[in-house]
């Protein structure tokens, strides 16, 4: 599903980008070309392909160096939040930054 010029303008506006018409047209072409590649990849049947733990596992034996999943630090939430301007119920409070 290719994007339209209006959708590119909306995305640019949300990203606070000021695109001139030639940049807008180039961006539209690049994004739509990307979506074409994604559609090609999605069309490949991978139902018979087993998932890999590592990309190299198809050509060589790979041993993953995984550590034991255990807690190694004590809970220091209160100490870490002492310098915060505002905290409520253990969470940092921050000012609203969404602009309309």
Image (cartoon, rainbow, N blue to C red):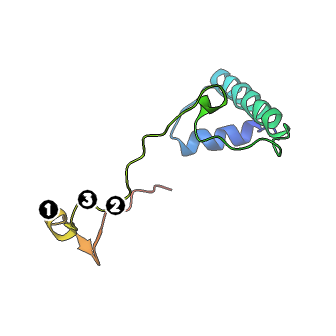
Q: Position of residue 59 (x, y in %)?
A: 65, 25
Callout 2: SS: loop
Callout 3: SS: loop
Callout 1: SS: loop
Q: Position of residue 90 (x, y in %)?
A: 27, 74
The residue nearer to you, when weighing 39 against 16, is: 39
Which residue has dot 2 on it?
Answer: 70
Disc number lying in front (2 or 1) = 2
Mark 3–mark 2 CB contact (< 8 Å): yes
In the picture shown, does residue 71 fall above or below 43? below
Position of 50 with respect to 55 (left or right) is right
Q: Position of residue 13 (x, y in %)?
A: 57, 42
Which residue has dot 1 on it?
Answer: 83
In the picture shown, does residue 3 fall above or below 89? above
Residue at image coords 23%, 60%: 73
The residue nearer to you, when weighing 60 against 24, is: 60
Instruction: Say which mark, if any, is on residue 72.
Output: 3
């Amino acid at each position: 599903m290719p994007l339209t010029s209006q959708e590119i303008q909306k995305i640019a506006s949300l990203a606070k980008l000021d695109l001139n018409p030639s940049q807008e047209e180039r961006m539209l072409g690049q994004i739509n070309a990307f979506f074409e590649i994604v559609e090609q990849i999605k069309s490949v049947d991978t139902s018979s392909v087993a998932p890999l733990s590592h990309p190299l596992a198809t050509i060589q034996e790979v041993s993953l160096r995984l550590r034991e999943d255990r807690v190694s630090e004590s809970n220091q939430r209160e100490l870490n939040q002492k310098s915060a301007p505002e905290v409520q119920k253990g969470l940092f409070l921050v000012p609203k930054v969404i602009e309309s």
